[in-house]
């Protein structure tokens, strides 16, 4: 009996569709990636509100205070309590004064955790008022439901 | 004449392995750093230290006082707007909004200059959860009519903290 000898080559799949898809995925993630996450803090889960909209123009001289559920305040990498916040605020205000601007032009953005005691937020506002800050923004998550 | 190499010339094949390696590395980087962006917005509050602002001067406006009471666990125990009780159930924030509309006398969009209009003072118990304060601020500052936001009270301030 005659046997046919077939030569077995290395099977080579067509890579083109896979590479196409991979590039599409990369393009998708590149477009959606957001490097401006510096404002976020892992200790803070914001409350929701249906009324707020993302601001069209960025706030002038923002001082961002993250308030954790236990009342700790995070400002520029350090954490404070309502009593010691003054030290951190003075540092921020020195920067604003060095730029030749008035303290009352600064905006204090309060990113409060949804479960923090409201009194803690009031205390923080009071400390800011003592430093002559008067514009506050309570940051909340937009609820689209 | 002798002709060598009559074999058909094949297309040159690039070695794809290194490119695919890099592409997968990029893909993994983007997948790991991906985070869905949550839209955030602000409630603006202009609150100078007592005695500095001009708010004490305009006595023509109705003084609205919102009192939020909490229980020991920080949950909402009751809402009062100028001594009108509104309870603490799910509908109480809707009642609050209805009362605000009743008190400021309009449910149409207010054509007022920034810094004008009625003012409300929020007096909350110390340990009430912040979430309820935001819900109350949402209820008094407006409501959504379809896609349009109807504004009610834009001037919000806090009373002194209660220890």
Image: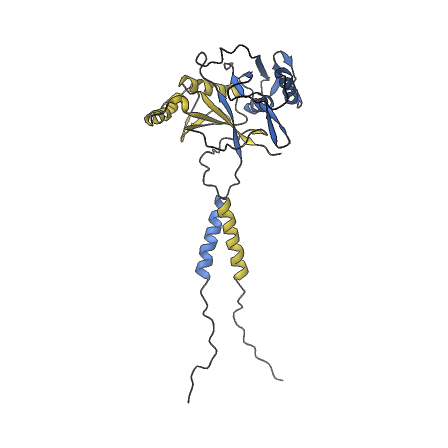
Quadrant in the picture for the C terminus of chain A: top right
Q: How is the image coloured?
A: by chain
Could you say which quadrant of the image residue A61 lies in? top left
x 45%, y 59%: residue: B19
Residue closer to the observer: B138 or B61: B61
Q: Is residue B124 visible to the viewer in this orientation of the structure?
A: no
Instruction: Give x and y (percent) for residue B84.
Output: 64, 13
Q: Vertically, is B17 above or below B84?
A: below
Q: Vertically, is A48 above or below B14?
A: above
x 62%, y 32%: residue: B147
Could you say which quadrant of the image residue B89 lies in? top right
Identify the chain drawn in yellow: A
Instruction: Give x and y (percent) for residue A123.
Output: 47, 18
Residue closer to the observer: B148 or B163: B148
Identify the chain drawn in blue: B
Is B37 on the left-hand or right-hand side of A94? right
Instruction: Give x and y (percent) for residue A64.
Output: 44, 28
Q: Vertically, is B115 above or below A18?
A: above
Instruction: Give x and y (percent) for residue B46.
Output: 48, 20
x 65%, y 22%: residue: B94
Residue closer to the observer: A102 or A80: A102
Residue most extreme to the bottom? B1
Q: Is residue A20 visible to the viewer in this orientation of the structure?
A: yes
């Amino acid at each position: 009996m005659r046997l046919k000898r077939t030569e077995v080559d290395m099977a080579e799949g067509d890579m083109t569709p896979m590479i196409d898809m991979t590039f599409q995925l990369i393009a998708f993630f590149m477009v959606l990636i957001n490097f401006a996450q510096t404002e976020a803090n892992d200790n803070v889960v914001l409350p929701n509100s249906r009324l707020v909209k993302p601001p069209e123009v960025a706030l002038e001289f923002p001082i961002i205070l993250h308030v954790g559920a236990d009342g700790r305040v995070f400002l520029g990498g350090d954490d404070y309590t309502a009593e010691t916040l003054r030290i951190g605020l003075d540092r921020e205000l020195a920067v604003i004064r060095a730029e030749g601007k008035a303290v009352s032009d600064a905006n204090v953005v309060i990113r409060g955790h949804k479960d923090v005691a409201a009194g803690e937020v009031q205390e923080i506002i009071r400390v800011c008022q003592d430093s002559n800050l008067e514009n506050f923004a309570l940051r909340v998550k937009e609820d689209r439901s | 004449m002798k002709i060598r190499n009559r074999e058909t010339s094949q297309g040159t094949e690039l070695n794809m392995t290194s490119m695919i390696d890099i592409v997968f590395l990029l893909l993994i980087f983007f997948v790991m750093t991906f985070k869905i962006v949550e839209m955030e917005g602000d409630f603006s509050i202009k609150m100078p230290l007592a005695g500095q602002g001009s708010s004490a001067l305009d006595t023509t406006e109705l003084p609205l006082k919102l009192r939020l009471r909490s229980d020991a666990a920080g949950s909402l125990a009751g809402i009062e707007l100028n001594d009108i009780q509104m309870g603490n159930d799910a509908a109480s924030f809707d009642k609050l909004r209805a009362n605000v509309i009743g008190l400021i006398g309009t449910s149409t969009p207010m054509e007022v200059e920034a810094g004008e209009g009625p003012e409300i003072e929020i007096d909350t118990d110390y340990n009430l959860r912040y979430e309820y304060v935001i819900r109350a601020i949402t209820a008094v500052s407006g409501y959504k009519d379809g896609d349009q936001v109807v504004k009610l009270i834009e001037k919000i301030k806090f009373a002194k903290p209660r220890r």
